Amino acid sequence: MLHRPTLSTLARAVVVFSVVGAWAAYSAPAAPAAGDPKLGAAVFKAKVCATCHKADGSGGVKLTGNPTPNWKDPKTWADPKRKDADAYLRDCITNGKTKSGMVAWGKTGQIKPPDIENLIAYIHTLAPPKK
Ligand code: HEC
């Protein structure tokens, strides 16, 4: 009789372990992982994005082509090319807009993919709240 509760405790431990294990396996390769806006803010500062985008993201700085977008303006986000906003931001940070002076940060290896996701999350915090 003594070994019975011990066995069921063991069985429960096995169940808990396999559930946790399955969850970890499921959550690990989330692609692409949601970024952390706080880490993104640090990268934004370190890579001097604000030189062209302004610290508040209002942009309007023109170099050779298009000016930097105004992330504070709802009209910017309503633009159809930003319909899938994350994909658009990811593409710009990865491949740049060299004609306009926007650096291909990802392609040149200056910013790694997880930090690109962090930047995307941060840029969203600059946008006006959705009504
Ligand atoms: C030398 C100036 C310059 C710097 C520095 C710069 N950008 Fe840009 N960026 C631009 C310009 C100009 C555009 C507009 C390109 C266009 O639309 O043709 C742009 C566009 C973008 C876009 C597209 C956004 C949209 O809504 O149209 C993103 C995202 C972006 N930049 C992120 C960044 C990040 C993050 C950094 C820092 C790592 C950075 N940029 C640094 C000039 C710059």
Image: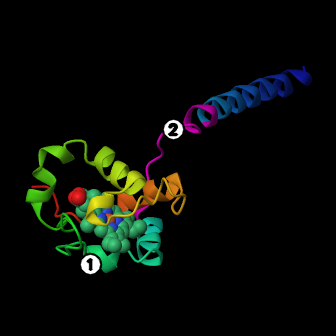
Q: Amino acid at mark 1?
A: Lys
Looking at the rendered image, the disc whose residue lies closer to the viewer, 2 or 1, is: 1
For disc 1, the marked residue is 54
Q: Main secondary structure of the magenta part?
A: loop
Most foreground residue, 126 or 90: 90
Q: Position of residue 53 (x, y in %)?
A: 27, 73
Q: Which secondary structure, mark 2?
A: loop
For disc 2, the marked residue is 30
Residue 124 appears in the picture as rendered: no
Mark 1 CB near ligand 1 (8 Å cut): no
Residue 70 left/right relative to 25: left
Q: Earlier in the sequence, mark 2 or mark 1?
A: 2
Q: Position of residue 121 (x, y in %)?
A: 36, 58
Most foreground residue, 15 or 44: 44
Figure quadrant of the C terminus: bottom left
Residue drawn at point x = 33 percent, y = 64 percent: 102
Label at residue 107: none
Q: Which stretch did the figure color magenta?
A: 24-37
Q: Position of residue 34 (x, y in %)?
A: 43, 49
Residue 54 appears in the picture as rendered: yes
Q: Which secondary structure, mark 1?
A: loop
Figure quadrant of the N terminus: top right
Residue drawn at point x = 20 percent, y = 75 percent: 61
Q: Is residue 8 above or below residue 31?
A: above
Q: CA distance from mark 2 to mark 1?
A: 32 Å
Q: Quadrant of residue 8?
A: top right
Q: Amino acid at mark 2?
A: Ala
Q: Quadrant of residue 87?
A: top left
Q: How is the image coloured?
A: rainbow
